[in-house]
Amino acid sequence: MKKNPKDAIEVNPKSMGQPGGIAALNAGAIDIAMSAMPITAEQAKLKVEQFEIARVAGIVAVNKNVTATNLTSQQLCDIYAGKIKNWKQVGGADAPIAALTRPESDSTKAMFRRPMPVWPV
């Protein structure tokens, strides 16, 4: 900022979601946006350009009291789909599962819905 005092940078920490960010870029309302996933084929037709700068690990965390281990990606999908409702169904204690997730519009959630490997910790 010292080198370019006439330039202003405004950072909005609140997410518009991936579709909102791409739409704002296309409309000229913002100059740069972040996304946790590549732009769609439809978005690629817009006046935006994407640059992959990093890949990050997606993490699923459980409470330290959960005794189930080595969950598969299918079991995680079934938990979030409501097919598995109790930890006993996946080798844990007899206790209901309370699953928290991101909003539907969140690009991280969209990426988690794609097939991915799961590595035990």
Image (cartoon, helix red, strand yellow):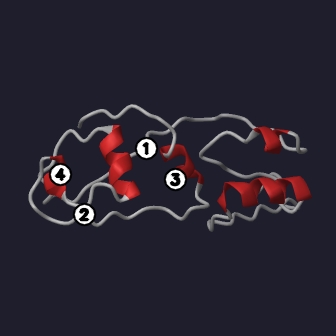
The 10 Å Cα crowd at callout 1, few under 14, some 14 to 19, many 20 or more, is few
Mark 4 / mark 3, whichever is N-terminal: 4
Mark 3 / mark 2, whichever is N-terminal: 2
Question: The residue under label 3 is which amino acid type?
Answer: Lys
Name of the residue lying farthest toward the front? 83
Mark 4–mark 2 Cα distance, whole angstroms, equals: 10 Å
The residue nearer to you, when weighing 15 against 69, is: 69
Residue at position x 77%, y 61% in the image? 9
Q: Which residue is tagged 3?
A: 109
Q: Nearer the viewer, mark 1 or mark 2?
A: 2
Quadrant location, the N terminus: bottom right
Q: Going by the image, does 3 lie left or right of 105? A: right
Q: Going by the image, does 60 lie left or right of 57? A: left
Q: Nearer the viewer, mark 3 or mark 2?
A: 2
Mark 3 / mark 1, whichever is N-terminal: 1
Residue at position x 17%, y 43% in the image? 69
Q: Which residue is tagged 1?
A: 58
Residue 90 image point, x, y percent: 18, 47
Identify the secondary structure beneath mark 4.
helix
Mark 1–mark 2 Cα distance, whole angstroms, equals: 20 Å
Q: Which residue is tagged 2?
A: 97
